[in-house]
Amino acid sequence: QVQLQQWGAGLVKPSETLSVTCGVFGGSLTGYYWTWIRQAPGKGLEWIGEINYGGNTKYNPSLKSRVSISVDRAQNQFSLNLTSVTAADTAVYFCARISRSVPYTWGQGTLVVVSS
Amino acid sequence: DIQMTQSPSSLSASVGDRVTITCRASQGFADALAWYQQKGGNAPRRLIYAASTLQTGVPSRFSGSGSGTEFTLTISDLQPEDFATYYCLQHFDYPWTFGQGTKVEVK
């Protein structure tokens, strides 16, 4: 059974770049789409974007100029980078595998706080 | 963007109650909708996909219905473990958008 494990810096300074990586264990990147979703403290869920094994991406226009998602086939993982962060980017960031067209298997979440 | 308006934002209910949560979409689509349950800060759990298909392993007291601009999640016999926050997600068009969430609390 596939499991997703996330890691990344928990504290990022304003204007710097947030990076979170999602490792895929017990399965392969091949044949699936992968997504990032975030949740600000006490708020709802926000879709950030998705990527497939071939590296094709879709991003939320609200973040499009700052976000990039990439895959590392050799390491069987995918990553989120968000540039020029502000306090508004403080959130728990979740990775997920898309199955039946929507997120099904999720990572544990990574809290990223933007603060100086 | 497709706006998903979820209601109510919260509700109080008792064990055994029937609970209904609604998501209204700003534009219609057939069945590109899923429902999730989230407890605390844990990752969401998928309950329903394709508007009405019950995820394997999810109790049959959960059901989804609807198409077009109105979708509904029903919990027919609320159990103690069902007190949580519920979200709808549309994936008909990019960007995918979630409803604002419904917190189901103990009455």
Image (cartoon, coloured by chain):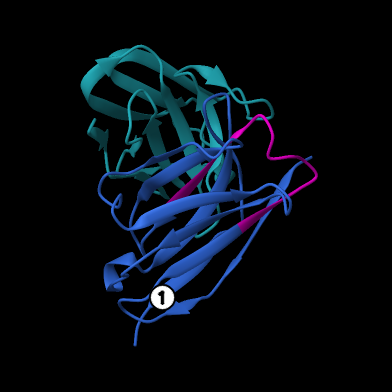
Chain colours: A blue, B cyan
A16 lies left or right of B43 = left
Q: Which x, y percent locates residue A3?
A: 72, 48
Residue, x 59% and y 48% (percent of image)?
Answer: A71
Chain label for disc 1:
A
Q: Residue furthest left?
A: B26
Magenta stretch: includes residue A26: yes
How crowded pointer 1 is (Cα within 10 Å; few <14, some 14-19, many 20+) is rated as many
- Among the 4 quarters of the image, the one containing residue B33: top left
Vertical relation: B70 (above or below) B11: above
Kind of element beneath mark 1 = strand
Q: Is residue B18 left or right of residue A9?
A: left
* Nearer-the-camera pick, A41 or B7: A41
Residue at which label 1 appears: A113
Magenta stretch bounds = A22-37
Q: Looking at the picture, how far across and down is residue A4, in whole percent? A: 67, 51
Q: How many marks?
A: 1
When the figure is inspected, residue B27 is found, relative to residue A19, above or below; the finding is above
Q: Nearer the viewer, residue A75 or A113?
A: A75
Q: Quadrant of the N terminus of chain A?
A: top right
In the image, residue B100 lies at what x, y percent? 29, 44
Residue at the location (32% across, 70% down)? A85
Q: Nearer the viewer, residue B10 or A13?
A: A13
Residue B72 relative to residue A79: left or right? left
Task: Out of A101 and B9, give the one closest to the viewer.
Answer: A101
**Is residue B83 in view from this perspective?**
no
Q: Amino acid at mark 1?
A: Val
Q: Is residue B85 visible?
A: yes
A69 in magenta = no
The image quarter in which residue B21 lies: top left
Quarter placement of the C terminus of chain A: bottom left
Residue at point 24%, 25% (across, down)? B25
Residue in the picture at 52% in, 46% down: B44
